[in-house]
Image (cartoon, rainbow, N blue to C red):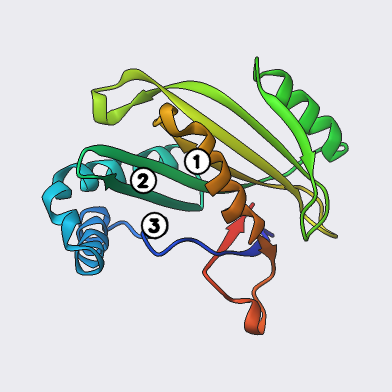
Amino acid sequence: MAQGVEFSLRLPPDWFVLDMKSDRVPAQVQRLVDEAVLRDPGVAAHRGRVESQVRSAMRRARAANLSFCAVLSTWVDDVLPLAASLTASVQSVRGSEREVLAEHLQRRKGALVETVEHRVGPVVRSSFVDVIADPALGGAAAKSAVWQYFFAVPERGGLVVVTAASPVLELREQFGSLFDAIVESFRFGVAGSDRVGVWGELVC
């Protein structure tokens, strides 16, 4: 029987949290952008670009069979587009989590890998620049800065992999600090007052 892994994350209010179980993608994207315009009327001037970025993120998350996806799409001084995504997935593992991580990270040439302390215990963090096909560019290759955080699931085993990415390489350091702050709020379980920010359930 498939089992769910419950977790919570605290995200800034200007992030779009996508319902990956819904088939009503256009209606969902329109509703999310409508809510963003209410929070910040300046979003209206970039509505088409924002909707495109949110749809692209959802398509990529669905293609990867991910259960959780959040997207940032905003502007600085009405010029610089800021785009980022954050996803989560559960990986069942055979053998130790350490062996699975070593195999995974060996495939990422040039990745910076380190172990950081977290409230749930030691977490492996990797960062690298990836080249992906961007639907917004007609499938053309585009570079994206990527951060991955590997959380060992207590008791049942396996890994929750939180992946954050942004194509704005000029602000790689700033986005790294932002993602570290968001992931710092990660916790397993959502009972009682722990249900803060964003809650998700991943099934594997």
For discs 2 and 1, the disc positioned in front in the rendered view:
1
- In this figure, which residue is indicated by the disc labeled 1? 175
Left or right of 12 in this view: 120 = right
The Cα atoms of the two marked residues, 3 and 1, are separated by: 14 Å
Left or right of 93 in this view: 164 = left
Q: Residue 184 occupies which quadrant of the picture?
A: bottom right
Secondary structure of the residue carrying tag 3 is strand
Circle 1 residues within 10 Å: few <14, some 14–19, many ≥20: many
Query: In terms of sequence position, does the residue under pointer 2 or pointer 1 come before the other?
Result: 2
- In this figure, which residue is indicated by the disc labeled 2? 58
For discs 2 and 3, the disc positioned in front in the rendered view:
3
Residue type (three-letter) at the residue carrying disc 3: Trp
Q: x, y (%) of residue 194?
A: 65, 77
Look at the picture and state if 29 lies above or below 146.
Answer: below
Circle 3 residues within 10 Å: few <14, some 14–19, many ≥20: some
Residue type (three-letter) at the residue carrying disc 1: Phe
Q: Residue at x 64, y 74 (%)?
A: 190
Q: Residue at x 83, y 39 (%)?
A: 97
Q: Are marks 2 and 3 in contact (CB under 8 Å)?
A: no
Most distant residue in the left direction: 45
Q: Residue at x 44, y 44 (%)?
A: 85
The Cα atoms of the two marked residues, 2 and 3, are separated by: 13 Å
> Which label sits on residue 56?
none
Q: Residue at x 25, y 31 (%)?
A: 136
Count of picture labels: 3
For discs 3 and 1, the disc positioned in front in the rendered view:
1
The Cα atoms of the two marked residues, 2 and 1, are separated by: 20 Å
- In this figure, which residue is indicated by the disc labeled 3? 15
Q: Nearer the viewer, residue 156 or 127?
A: 127
Q: Residue 91 occupies which quadrant of the picture?
A: top right
